[in-house]
Image: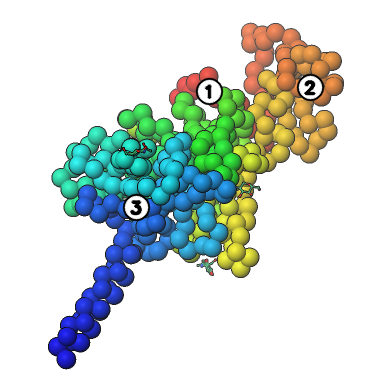
Amino acid sequence: MDVLYYMVIFTIFLFFFFCFSDGTDMITSSQPISDGKTLVSQDGSFELGFFSPGSSKGRYLGIWYKNIPIKTVVWVANRNRPIIGLSGLLMVNNTGDLVLTSENKTVVWSSGSKKVAQNPVAQLLHSGNLVLRDEKEYNSDMVLWQSFDYPTDTLLPGMKLGWDLRTGLDRRLSAWKNQDDPSPGDLHSGLTVNNFPELILWKGSKKYTRSGPWNGLRYSGEPESSSSTLFELNFISNEEEAYFTYNIRNKSVISRFVLNQTNSLGQRLIWNEETRNWIPYFYLPRDMCDNYGHCGAYGTCDDTQLPLCQCLKGFKPNSPQNWNSMDWSLGCMRNKPLDCASGDGFIKFNRLKLPDTTYSWVKK
Ligand SMILES: *[C@@H]1O[C@H](CO)[C@@H](O)[C@H](O)[C@H]1NC(C)=O
Ligand SMILES: *[C@@H]1O[C@H](CO)[C@@H](O)[C@H](O)[C@H]1NC(C)=O
Ligand SMILES: *[C@@H]1O[C@H](CO)[C@@H](O)[C@H](O)[C@H]1NC(C)=O
């Protein structure tokens, strides 16, 4: 009778032990996670663990949505160094760094945190952010390291795209090379810092498209980019920081912004629970006119007109021959030299994206 009693108690204990140890959201120095185990954020929206993308056999440490049926990875740690086999282990080491090791304790990735903590733990938050912090430190400004500062190809709500100018941290996105390989492709995106920061998409080292500077409500060249009943967009630019961020007003809507090498787009997608699919909401570049410098210097682009390119008033094609054969890359030049003394001044143009501001300055 006693034996049965203890067995029942023991079984109940085991049941609870497994229930709770399975649902953990935290790594401590005594509790690493190995391939096959995962962390789940407390609200059940994100999961961190090891995976093999597409037809790849390599193992990567990543974060994905827990509550949608299509495995959608939003962050990868060891993008360039897949682990062969199931030996992967993520742990907090004795110097307080978050470290990913493979066979024979070979380090394949580390957070590189140099900050000292008494009792460092890594926790997967509701937002999908993996933070390394001191166990007793809950202030989000005091984290030792966070995955949101080192994005992969995806901008989640609450992430910052852009700069911490105090530390020189530049948070950029870069697309996966392809569906089987999360290492960076040549499509990447970030914020330029100058008087009018703007969002740029590059292909390799070439500018591919640009948003136009933020005008207080939206990117001036992207009419669809303003806040809406669905999204709240914010653009911060001061001496300490320059970044873009967004939030979703309705917490039950799932949405992400992602760079995609396959179709060369930066896309905002929304999860549709009925069709169980990601639906495009907004994408960049949208048309030919979004291609960087499509009409050359002093040219304007209008995709409702043919030909697409025109010279600004007072300008003519640099090479009429190229221009007429629809090669607009050489752009336009002044009809006659600028002469402010005899009345040349400014004219207003409507509905144009502000020119590239990299080399411009403002007099306030
Ligand atoms: C790990 O160590 C074992 C024993 O020393 C060795 O045979 C094996 O090649 C090592 N594996 C790797 C991936 O270095
Ligand atoms: C929030 O989104 C859900 C799912 O799309 C929808 O059913 C609900 O009506 C929305 N709530 C509000 C206040 O818009
Ligand atoms: C990129 O686009 C392709 C084709 O539209 C799609 O199959 C793939 O899932 C997309 N990748 C991402 C990361 O969204």
Residue 3 appears at what percent x and percent y? 17, 85
Q: Amino acid at mark 2?
A: Asp
* Label of residue 116 in the image: none
- Residue 163 visible to the viewer: yes
Horizontally, residue 167 falls left or right of residue 7, namely: right
Q: To which residue does mark 1 refer?
A: 358
Which quarter of the picture shows residue 355? top right
Name the residue located 74 percent from the left edge and 9 percent from the top edge.
336
Q: Amino acid at mark 1?
A: Thr
Q: Nearest the camera: 239 or 91?
A: 91
Name the residue located 50 percent from the left edge and 49 percent from the top edge.
52
**Which of pointers 1 and 2 lies earlier in the amino acid sequence?**
2
Residue 172 appears at what percent x and percent y? 47, 36
Is label 1 in a helix, a strand or a loop?
loop
Q: Nearest the camera: 312 or 262?
A: 262
**Which of pointers 3 and 2 lies earlier in the amino acid sequence?**
3
Label 1 or label 3, whichever lies nearer to me, is 3
Image quadrant holding the C terminus, namely top left
Mark 2 CB lies closer than 8 A to ligand 3: no
Q: Amino acid at mark 3?
A: Ser
Q: To which residue does mark 2 refer?
A: 327
Q: Nearest the camera: 241 or 38?
A: 38
Residue 296 appears at what percent x and percent y? 70, 22
* Label of residue 34 in the image: 3
